[in-house]
Amino acid sequence: MLWNYWRKLNRSAVKLRLSKTEKAFCRLTVADYMSSHPVRISEPIRQLYWQKQIILTFKSFLTPKFMIPVILILAVALSGGTAAAAQSALPGEALYVVKTEINESVLAAFSWSAEKKAEFQERLIEKRLDERAELIENNKITSLLEEKVAKQIEKHVNKTKELVAKLEKKGNNIAAESALGKLSNYLATRQAALEKAGEAKPELKAKVEELKKDIEAKQVAMALKIAEIQQSAGADAVAVKNAAQVQLDNFAGRIADTKSLFADAREKMSPEQIKKVEEKLAATDKLYAEAKVKFVAGQYFDSLKSVLAAHKEIIVARQLIAMKNWEKKLDAEESDLDNDEDKAAELKDKEAEKAVESKLKAAESELKAAEKAAEIKVKAEEKAAEIKAKAEEKLAESKAKADEKAVEVKKEAEKKSKDSEEKD
Amino acid sequence: MTNAERFIEAYDKWADAIFRFAYFRVYNRESAKELMQEAFCRAWQYMVDGKEIDNLRALLYQIARNLIIDQSRKKQAVSLDQMKEKGFEPSNILDNIEKSLDHEMEWRATMAGLGRLEPEYREAVELRYVAGLRPREIAKITGQNVNVVSVRINRGVQKIKQYLAEDKK
């Protein structure tokens, strides 16, 4: 009875609906509202339907997402002082692996979002540079260790790139651009420092160029995305006007923000850098003023384009401002070396000595290994011969036994046949 | 697919359901249509404000519900008796429904059970069985605990069962 009731209720209710015209008309009103109120940040709608949400039950803690950090924490906790001691380990020391492979993995597990993970990788690059500086300070640097550090940095750079790709896939273009920007800053300053020191690496230069192109492509993609949103919301003059208005409003804040950043960082910057930033800011102001004029004149699309051009300029200005940190660090490293040439020479001698030593050691160990291998070979041959002899002996024995048995069986069979014949 | 496209897709899918939900409360086709439209616009505004949307369908129902509550508060001066005096009959909603609904008696019979329920039970039962939402979604819309919602649905169903049995007698 009740089932019937629900069926009737549902059937009747479903019949209550909007007519096609009504629905289309309301749709138009909603679409109109959407185009006049564009979404500035394209945060995706997570789900249209209801899906199981993450509720922290005991069971949910048993998933890999939670268990990996837990296991890592336990590993670190159980290792006790080892992990703590490893924290200050330098490349070439026994505990360095614990630091990079366990401690840092634990810390990385605490960064949930791709954005935070990218930030963490950037911090690790900085850390590797600090370690290198410390090695130089303690006269411990060798070409082998230098290579090790470079490899580690390469690893972090690649990881950051992966995360940037992830961010882009999620539609978080702003974060992707910022992470890439930071990375290119670091690589560009590093390259500049190396050039200064006369040891420019062509592959690093190529990498910087590649990253720069990537950033530009991302900016174009961002502009395209804005246009796409406009189109999907029914692109018309009103939509473009609104988009331009939004961009103009937002950009005023960005200019103010950048200027205050510049004011803070100005003291620590070189006059050359200050000049460059000022040029970029002037260009930004000019483009912004142009955009405003075009907006007033009703050229909304051109106004939007000018804002995007200003956006490009301001990004460069911000990069220049942000660069000061890296440059300071690199300058410090360089001054260490420059101020103390003797130290550098000594270092080179020591390096050479160490290289010879290590070669000698390698040769020795090779010899030892060869000796050992020869010994093992002889022993193995001896054992093989022994085993072979034993096997042959056993084979002969078993053959003899088998023959004896066969004779016995034959005799018995003969006896039996005789018996049966007799009985017959 | 962009957010705007997804949103329009959502409109095509749920405009009727939200309209129905509003209609069962205001019993006026035009008002229900306006409420539905307003709910979609406000949901879009929600995104414009940069808020995150976990479940768009639940949000739409939630907004529609709040709009209905606001509207009923504004019209509090008009009591049900006054409305009845003017010829309004809650169960006589068929006049407003499209002509495609031909089984008048059937409709009256089915609505009668729901109409006798107390508002909170009625809302829960309607959202569950007419709109086809799950208790968790209903809890999100009404701002209550899932257990409370489940209990209400259960008791509402029991009561309708009782009414139907009584009617049969």
Image: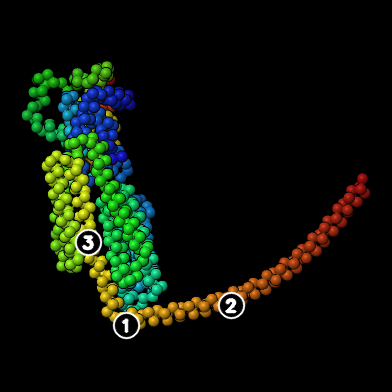
Q: Chain of mark 1?
A: A
* Mark closest to the chain's N terminus, 2 or 3: 3
Residue occupying the point 27% across, 18% down? B100
Secondary structure beneath disc 2? helix
Element type where label 1 sits in the image: helix
Q: Residue A355: percent from the left, percent from the top?
A: 44, 78
Q: Callout 1, which amino acid?
A: Asp
Residue B80 appears in which quarter of the rendering? Answer: top left
Which image quadrant is residue A125 in?
Answer: bottom left
Give the amino acid at mark 3: Leu
Q: Do dots 2 and 3 share one subunit?
A: yes
Circle 2: residue type: Glu
Q: Residue under mark 3: which chain is it in?
A: A
Q: Taking B125 as reference, is A178 above or below it?
A: below
Q: Using the image, determine if residue A9 lies above or below residue B149.
A: above
Q: Which residue is mark 3?
A: A320
User: Alpha-carbon distance for marks 2 and 3?
Assistant: 60 Å
Q: How is the image coloured?
A: rainbow
